Image: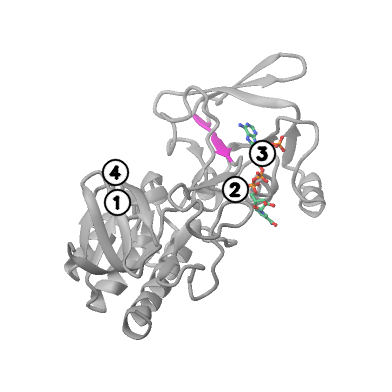
Amino acid sequence: MDTLYDLIIIGGGPAGLAAALYAGRAKMKTLLFEGEKYGGQIALTTEVENYPGAAVNETGPGLVARMAEQAEHFGVELKLENVTEVDFASKDKKVTTAKGDYFAKTIIIATGANPRKLGVPGEADLTGKGVSYCATCDGAFFEDLPIYVIGGGDTAVDEAYFLSKFGRKVTIVHRRDELRAARSIQDKVFNTPNIEVMWDSVVEEIGGDGLVEKLVLKNVKTGELTEVNASEDDGTFGVFVLVGYIPANELLVDKITLDEQGYVPAGEDMKTDVPGVFVAGDLRAKKLRQVVTATSDGALAAIQAEAYVQHEY
Ligand code: NAP
């Protein structure tokens, strides 16, 4: 058989890289796969303010590049190969990429979750330049500016309330005439003077030259288009797209148990229902998806993987 690793980590965001660091320091023979470039969601964030110890002007790509270097320093092999298949049926688990099969005693899955996109013109180009998918990450950058929140679920409504502490005015843009969010959260929002709701509306286009400057909205009942433009004084405004998440679970369907939303249920020990297979980061069913919670999951998963190799393999 090819090399048998102690641990293969799938996913090179903060959860996977933190797991790699802990595994490397524990002298586990460890291989980490990341599809295209390290970082996951955080690599899309221009400025990271909420990770303890982050430098002033810390960028997402900068932070994860150092995490990757740190893991390599402790002997972890990092490979930019897309994992196409996993097989957990045998004691030694198999991970397949376009370049071949790899085998390990334990696996940590840290493939994350991706925010659902609107798929409208301008959205991709202006991501990180006014378009955001994370209020906790980026809210503070819109101090005293208008903010548009797209979506009507718990996340959108919760975060609209959070963003109302930064933005001069927050407008929730929802495609129906009733919110999906829990009544208690709705009440909070309806009682906040600087939040309003634009009903029956969808985004048609996001525009701007380097920063968001324009939003085109359509009333789905009347077909009427409304163009929102940044004032000269503001120069820009925020567009928070909070229309749900899509867990990156494609490899796992029928391989491990997923919850109703497609996340992997696991407690503090990060154990999935397959012995020797652990989960870490945004793919785990949890309340707060942040770098700080992802790295914590990664450390815990690596420690559990080490214990499995020592006592259960
Ligand atoms: P969600 O419940 O799936 O809501 C997504 C929202 O986005 C819905 O209002 C939906 O509209 C809208 N939407 C979806 N696709 C859209 C599109 N292409 N264009 C415009 N609008 C679109 O997602 P979530 O709010 O992220 O919540 C995910 C889960 O986490 C839920 O189970 C939620 O209850 C839970 N959660 C709970 C809390 C809390 O308890 N405080 C906080 C956050 C999240 P429609 O309503 O018309 O479908």
Where is 115 relative to 260, above or below? above
Label 1 vs label 3, nearer the camera: 1
Which residue is found at the position 63% from the left and 49% from the top? 159
Q: Secondary structure at mark 3?
A: strand
- Asked if the residue at tag 1 contacts the one at tag 2, i.e. Cβ–Cβ closer than 8 Å, the answer is no
- Image quadrant where residue 193 sits: top right
How far, Cα to Cα, is label 2 from label 1? 46 Å
- Residue 34 lies, in percent from the top left, at 30, 51
Residue nearest the viewer, comparing 160 with 32: 32
Mark 3, Cα crowd under 10 Å, few <14 / some 14-19 / many 20+, is some
Mark 1, Cα crowd under 10 Å, few <14 / some 14-19 / many 20+, is some
Instruction: Read off the residue under disc 4.
Output: 36
Magenta part of the chain: 234-241
Mark 4 residue type: Glu
How far, Cα to Cα, is label 3 from label 4? 38 Å
Mark 2, Cα crowd under 10 Å, few <14 / some 14-19 / many 20+, is some
Instruction: Read off the residue under disc 1.
Output: 96
For disc 1, does the CB lie below 8 Å from ligand 1? no
Q: Secondary structure at mark 1?
A: strand
Label 2 vs label 1, nearer the camera: 1
Instruction: Read off the residue under disc 3.
Output: 169
- Image quadrant where residue 217 sits: top right
How far, Cα to Cα, is label 2 from label 3? 9 Å
Mark 1 residue type: Thr
- Asked if the residue at tag 4 contacts the one at tag 2, i.e. Cβ–Cβ closer than 8 Å, the answer is no
Where is 124 relative to 304, above or below? above
- Give residue 166's mark: 2
Which residue is found at the position 25% from the left and 58% from the top? 102
Q: Earlier in the sequence, mark 3 or mark 4?
A: 4
Work out whether residue 46 can be spotted. Answer: yes
- Residue 252 lies, in percent from the top left, at 46, 53
